[in-house]
Image (cartoon, rainbow, N blue to C red):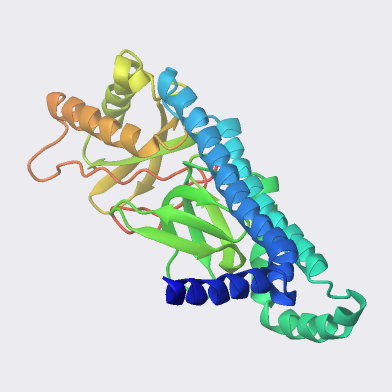
Amino acid sequence: MTTKTLVALPVADLWHGFWHGEIGSWMLTVGVRIALLVIGALLTARMINWIARRVTRRIDAEYQESDQLVRSESAKHRQAVASVISWVSIAVLFVVVGVEITDALNVPVGSLVAPAAVLGAALGFGAQKLVQDLLAGFFIITERQYGFGDLVQLSMIGAPEASEGTVEEVTLRVTKLRTGEGEVFTVPNGNIVRSLNMSKDWARAVVDIPVPASADLNRVNDVLHDVGEKAMEDARLSALLLDSPQLMGVESIELDTVNLRMVARTLPGKQFEVGRRLRIRIIAALTTAGIATADHTPTLGNLNPSSGAADKETGTGRTEQKP
């Protein structure tokens, strides 16, 4: 019993002496303050992320619960701004916490001026790309070049082909695109030299219709005009159209075919679906009219977005500009 008491007393003395010593006192004062700052910063960052996700989910819920077929431009912009605000808030939060920790450690700010100048010069050369990404992202968002849910085509420095997909996230530094195959591209904003938004405000479906050169063009025009009028009678198709499809007339003349063009203004991002539906109607109408023959079966050209994208299915690279 005596031995155990003698062993316990030195341990208790050591424990008491540790917390009343220099290291223990530092941990109870400065150490606790730093720990609280770090824990508070982490919890605040998680709360900011939670609020940002809740805001974006609410915007999504408004779109899902409404009868809108596409997201509004304001909704796309609000989601992009919510993402940027959360990112900037977290960055500012950790900068403030870093300054508070420096103050808690009694590090004189004046002594950091010279090292900070050297470090700033080094980072100035090494972080030029980061600054370029941030500035490019700032202008992308403030100018509303594209937002969440937009179908875009981005041409980048050093890339032989443009990346195309649906915008899933826009921050000050990067843009994330999901392709039609489900792949996700993360594109630094500073690398973007040209952005093509195929779902802003409205789009245009462009359908090229080759018919035999021997066909009666007056009859072909009547058939295609009828297709445009009946398209508005289809409830599913008319919901995607802003006005009736218009026949533009003869686009080009080849050796044995004449190409006519039909265009239709659609909801943003719906030009491809409208183009497919119009092709089905045109083929059926021409076949019924006896214009489509075994030797001259109409092969309908691809629709092009109003912003001037290349032909996606035929690879002809034709472009169509807004009027």
122 shown above or below 76: below
Q: Position of residue 9 (x, y in %)?
A: 55, 72
Which corner quadrant holds the N terminus?
bottom left
Q: Position of residue 230 (x, y in %)?
A: 30, 16
In the image, farthest residue toward the right: 110
Residue in the picture at 38% in, 19% down: 239
* Front-most of residues 200 and 7: 7
Which corner quadrant holds the C terminus?
top right
Quarter location, residue 189: bottom right
Q: Position of residue 286 (x, y in %)?
A: 19, 29
Quarter location, residue 147: top right
* Front-most of residues 79 and 193: 79
Q: Locate residue 14 relative to residue 286 in the image: left or right.
A: right
Q: Position of residue 90 (x, y in %)?
A: 65, 53
Q: Can the viewer see residue 78?
A: yes
Residue in the picture at 77% in, 83% down: 119
Q: Can the viewer see residue 71?
A: no
Residue in the picture at 47% in, 48% down: 167
109 shown above or below 193: below
Residue in the picture at 83% in, 75% down: 107
In the image, farthest residue toward the left: 294
Quarter location, residue 272: top left
